[in-house]
Structures are given as structure tokens and as C-alpha cells.
Image (tube, rainbow, N blue to C red):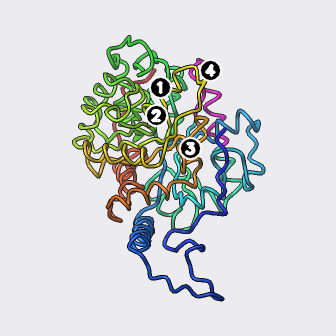
Amino acid sequence: MTARTDSSSAVPFGTAPSSSAPSSSAPSSRAPSSADASSADALATVAAALDLAPLIDGHNDWAWECRENRDYSVEGLDGALATDTDIDRLRAGRVGGQFWSVYVEDTLDGADAVQGTLEQVDWVYRLAARYPQTFVIATSAADVEAARASGRVASLLGAEGAHSLNDSPAVLRMLARLGVRYLTLTHVHNTSWADSGTDEPVHNGLSPRGVEYIRELNRLGMLVDLSHVSPATAHAALDVTSAPVIFSHSSCSAVTADPRNVPDDVLARLADNGGVLMVTFVPQFVSAEYAGWFGGDRSTPAPRVTVAQVADHVEYARDVAGIRHIGLGGDFDGTDEFPEGLEGVDGYPALLLELARRGWTAAELAALAGANVLRVLRATDAAFAGHDVELTRLTR
């Protein structure tokens, strides 16, 4: 797993690092440099952005990590951990909302996949119950804002891969009743009605049944998550959906060619749809050099991947889709390595700081950090609350 970043050395945003402050016993006579002023301005911009909106991440696999290595225990998560995620680092990273991925591998199928997904949902609920001063279950934009007001991390749920449904619309509806706010249509393999971006296509995107699933997701107020799907599937879903979509953890194909990333013709459609690309930090999706190494024999040291390269994806997505259509989806605890400076959930401010140094305003950073995905939630909250009186057409 990714080496732990020491959150004790993190500097609160809006304050200068202690090493740069004059000592009370030996005042400094050095005049502030333009670099000092620029850094202070960038820190102030990040602090202002995080006052404007909570930082909401689209995808974190801590539940899966705790399944694999902790037998689903929620004990001891308030100490220093070897995982990418722990409570101290969530605080240091200024995380205000997290979509916890409720995921099982798509080599599981049938009832086993359904059971595994329910166990993941249960873990998130037990996490919130065990640490009520830190986490609270959230199912709406209003819940996220209330969590922020109480100083807690809004804990949202997203199901990664429709294999978790066992092709049962009833299971989908039950996941909605348990508070699951998005469904990723595929994982690394096709489902019976949607093509993955990392499998051989069989549906030309979506089958007719897949189209009906998109309509049912819209009726339920569950977000359609297009990470992992093929471009044809993304286009087909965008053709059908009446609600904004998300990509919970993907980056830009034009910057790093990878089937997990999003091509320009799909990105450009987010402006009309109202959806959000939540840029991921996974090194092989961020850096072409790292992707080449990752796909090879790995006999040489891994190429460096940096915060600046993630920022390049963010800026590219902004330029193609627009400032209202970008967010963050780190995929922490979902892969083994992360870029330098983004090794854990305490790293988000470093990315915001990089963008502030490039001239991003507080309002732009706030849109990226959480305001955009909050808008998408708010647009679908009424349907999710059951205010859509239309009866389902997808009974089984």
C-alpha cells in the first residue's frame, strides 16, 4: 500500500509554515520576497476556497481495504494507519464529504456480488456509528451542508459496478433505499447490459435493457457514474439520461491515453448535461510515462508522478468541459501508488495550492473542490427522496 504521509507536518491553510515565521528570540531582518508573497497569497486563496465549499471526493475504497485486511473491523481507525485513509489525514486534507465506494470485484457474480456489496454498505454505516464525532451518513446536498456545519465528514455511498445488482432492478431500488447515491455502470468487465472501457464491446455501449436502467436510475435520483465505461457507453448514457452524470474517478484521455480516461467528445457533452468529471490521482491514468512502466515488466524504478501532472488534467478538463463540470475523485485505497504529494487523503490542499499558484481564484477552486458535485446532488435530491411519483417500468 501507499506509504503514509505524516499529517503532523501538514501546515493549516491560511497560515504560514512555522519554519518561515520569525523566531521570538531572534527576529529576522530579511525582507519578504515576491516568492513569499506569492506563496502567502496562494495559501490564502486555498483557505478562502475551502470556506466557500466543502471538499468532496468522488471515490475512496477504504471499505474494500478494510474488507481485505481488517476483516471489516472498524476498530482502531482513529490512529495512524498504513492505508491511504485515516481520520487524522481526512482532517488534515480538509475533507468535508466522501463518496465511499461500496465495491466488490466483478469476478464475483450473482448473489455473491449482491451480498458483498451489502457488506460494504454495512461497513460504512458501522464506521459512522463507531466514530459519530467524525462521520455522519449523508444522502443529499442538505445532509452534506449539515455535516459541514457540525464539523463532520459527510459519508455518501456509491456502488462501483452494476455486477453488484445481479441484473435485478429490485436490488437497485433496495440500494437506493439504503442511501446509495450513485451506480458505476461497469467495472473492468462488461455487464449484461453495458460495455466497460477495458473489455471487448458486446452491446455497442448500452443494450435496450441498459437504456431502461439509465431511466430507472434517473427516476430513483441515483447518479449515473460513467467511470470505467467505454466511450460508446458514455455517449449512449448521455443520449438517454435526463439528469446530470458523474465520472467518479477518471482523468483526460487527451493528456494520458488510457481506456479509463475520458475522451474530449465525451467531456465536451458535460456542459449541456450538467455533469461533473471528478479527476482521479491514479498514476497510470495521470502520466503516460508511468502508464508505460506500469504496463511493462516494471524492472526499472517507477517514473515520478507529481501533483503538477494531476493539475494538468484538472486544467485540461476545465478547458474542455468548463469550470462547472470538474471535481476530484482520488481513488485512495484503490491502487498501490499515488503521485508525490498526494500519497494520502491529506494531500488535497497541495493540489489546490498548485492550482492557486497557477492563478485559480477561490471561487474556481471551490467549484472544483465540491460546489460542482453538490450542485449535481441538489439537482437529483428530490427524485432520490421519492418525490418522483412515476411508477417504475423496469420491474424485473
Q: Is residue 324 magenta?
A: no
Residue 263 image point, x, y percent? 30, 31
- In the rendered structure, which amino acid carries the disc numbered 3? Trp
Q: Which of pointers 3 and 1 indicates the residue nearer the eye?
A: 1
Query: Which quadrant of the figure has residue 253?
Result: top left
- Determine whether the residue tagged by mark 4 lies in a helix, strand or loop: helix
* Horizontal arrangement in the rendering, residue 153 relative to residue 203 (left or right): right
Identify the mark nearer the N-term, 4 or 1: 4
Front-lying residue, 296 or 45: 296
Q: Disc 2 on helix, strand or loop?
A: strand
Helix, strand or loop status at disc 3: strand
Under tag 1, what secondary structure? helix
The residue labelled by disc 3 is 100
Specify which label sits upstream in the sequence, 4 or 3.
3
Q: Which marked residue is nearer to the observer: mark 2 or mark 3?
A: 3
Sequence order check, earlier mark of 3 and 1: 3
Q: Is residue 95 above or below residue 362?
A: above
Q: Name the residue under label 2.
A: 183
**In the current view of this chain or complex, which residue is farthest to the left?**
272
Density class for disc 3 (Cα within 10 Å; few <14, some 14-19, many ≥20) is many
Residue interval drawn in magenta: 103-123
How many C-alpha atoms fall within 10 Å of the one at disc 4: few (<14), some, or many (≥20)?
A: few
Q: Main secondary structure of the magenta part?
A: helix
Q: Which mark is residue 111?
A: 4
Image location (x, y in percent) of residue 275? 32, 43
Q: On the picture, is 380 further left or further right than 145?
A: left
- 18 or 95, which is in the foreground? 18
Cβ atoms at labels 4 and 1 below 8 Å apart = no
| Foreground tag (4 vs 3) | 3
Residue under pointer 1: 292
In the rendered image, the vertical position of residue 43 relative to residue 287, given as above or below:
below
The residues bearing labels 1 and 2 have C-alpha atoms spaced at a distance of 30 Å
